[in-house]
Image (tube, grey):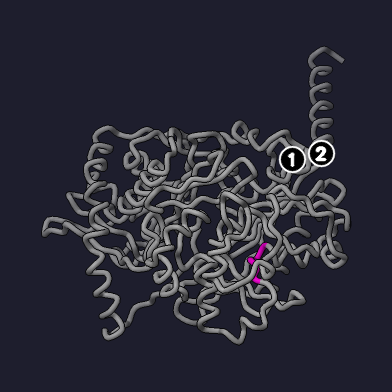
Amino acid sequence: MNQTDEARRMHTQHELHTEQTARTEPVVIGVDLGTTSTKAVAFRTDGTLEASSSVGYPLDEPHPGHAVQDPLVILDAVLAAVREVVDEVGADRVAGLAFSSAMHSLIGLSPTGEPLTEVVTWADTRSRAQAERIRASAGGLALHRRTGTPVHPMSPLPKLVWFHEQEPKLCERVGFWVGIKEFVLLRMCGALVVDHSIASATGLMNMETLTWDGEALTVAGILPEQLPELVATTTVLPGLTDEAAAATGLPQAMPVVVGAADGPLANLGVGAVRPGVAACSIGTSGAMRVVVDRPAVDPLGGVFCYALTATRWVVGGAINNGGLVLGWAGDALAPDLDEPPEEELLALAARALPGSGGLLMLPYLLSERAPHWSSLPRGAYVGLTRAHRREHLVRAALEGVCLQLALVLRSMRAAGLDVTQIRATGGVMRSPLWRQMLADTFGMDIDFALGQEGSGFGAALLGMEALGLIESIDVVADMVEIEQTVRPDPAAAAVYASLLPVFTELYDALVPAFMSLRRLTPSLPVDLDESEPPGA
């Protein structure tokens, strides 16, 4: 055997040894309970994805403003997704489970833990009147500043007020009020606990004391005994129930890390954990978040503040109207385009110059969250002239989304945050036009990360830290690979910088019109489909 053949043999043996070693390395399964599906993802400690599974479920809208789900269907989806991953990687390699969940859900349980209500999701807006009443009261902004959660129909606080006003008999039967992750953990582990991250998104927990806020509970009409025990996000539960172990194929002694909320964990998913590094995502909706070492809310209450770990909080804001605005533009402005129309729409928008010839769109098709936190606003085009064409209307719609995120960024800075770097992800971010427009609107370089499993990856990392498999979640900053850095075009950035103050003023200027339209709408003929798709 010559030296070349011997070198090849040694290289092959090394590769086989490396592959065999990888197959025996422990994994942590991140379980992400999303709005329309649960995803289970198994990661090694170096960030390598070993296996994934996703099981979907419907978001039901039985009445206008209602957006609910069956908690037992979601539980079955969790068990099925975990089982599929366990079957692929092998139960003996699983070091633990760690959970992520969509925020703001609410379920009423009987004293024995049986669901008395459906899952009332963040997208449910039935408590709009209650939220507006609380927000307008003298204590509305104070509640936001103490709890970190804006007073908005998405939040469990106004939802609880709605239940007490509209379903008092039901409330008398409720022993506990929980969210979907708490229900799943109760069934899988037999523990009624809620992590500080999910709790900080209820509007019921005091950020400074990490206890249930007495005034918030009084407004909600509940007692602290009706809520789960507050625990740290890194809390490890001792194991699974007999039923959960049998359903997942895991041993009963499997450690389960309680985990956190999906928004804060999404920052982990893109490696945005260091000071000044913000995560920006645009899917159906959108969000901006940055990790800080202590709670912070801006004086006007434009941002939320949710816990991640004992020493990390996430400050930012979510917007209702992201990529769905492009979908609306395709349906309303360009129904003649081929299916799918996204690429043609973007090409159409690219024909217009930045600023759309002085045309602005307020993209409030589904009202809005940050930084206004109001169900009142509606979408509007302002500045329309005879010279504007379809490409200007489409581009102005996309620019409106970016300008709204710029308002969120401004509110984050008003909260005292020094945002020096942005990492962006999301379905629409595959488009070069969206990427450039976002960089131009922010006037900052934006890094685009290679695909990760988002909140599921973040949950797995948090689980690794809790189980002592990694030193700190800080390692993620070096795990995530940057695919592209987009720099702002100076001329376009100057255009958007000049338009942002006008865009900002338009909201306040149109509030009287929004209020008049709300009063008038019930008396007007309606042939619109106002169903609300789930957000990202």
For the N terminus, the image quarter is top right
Of the residues shown, which amino acid type is indicated by label 1?
Arg
Question: Distance from label 2 to label 1 (Cα)?
Answer: 7 Å
Q: Residues within 10 Å of mark 1 (few under 14, many from 20)?
A: many
Q: Is residue 11 above or below residue 376?
A: above
Residue 393 in view: no
Q: Is residue 88 left or right of residue 72?
A: right
Q: Is residue 273 above or below residue 204?
A: above
Q: Is residue 179 left or right of residue 29?
A: left
What percent of the width, then of the height, locates residue 499? Answer: 23, 46
Please check the rendered image and state whether residue 178 is part of the magenta-colored stretch, yes or no.
Answer: yes
Residue 194 in view: yes
The magenta segment is 177-181
Q: Residue at x 57, y 49 (%)?
A: 208
Give the quarter of the image for residue 11: top right
* Tag 2–tag 1 contact (CB < 8 Å): yes
Q: Residue at x 78, y 50 (%)?
A: 236
Of the residues shown, which amino acid type is indicated by label 2?
Glu
Q: Residue at x 78, y 59 (%)?
A: 83
The one nearer the camera, 79 or 351, is 79
Determine the secondary structure under disc 1.
loop
The one nearer the camera, 437 or 200, is 200
Determine the secondary structure under disc 2.
loop
Q: Residue at x 67, y 55 (%)?
A: 195
Give the quarter of the image for residue 469: top right
Q: Is residue 119 left or right of residue 21?
A: left
What percent of the width, then of the height, locates residue 26? Answer: 81, 41
Question: Mark 2 sits on what residue?
Answer: 25
Question: Mark 1 sits on what residue?
Answer: 44
What percent of the width, then of the height, locates residue 207? Answer: 56, 51
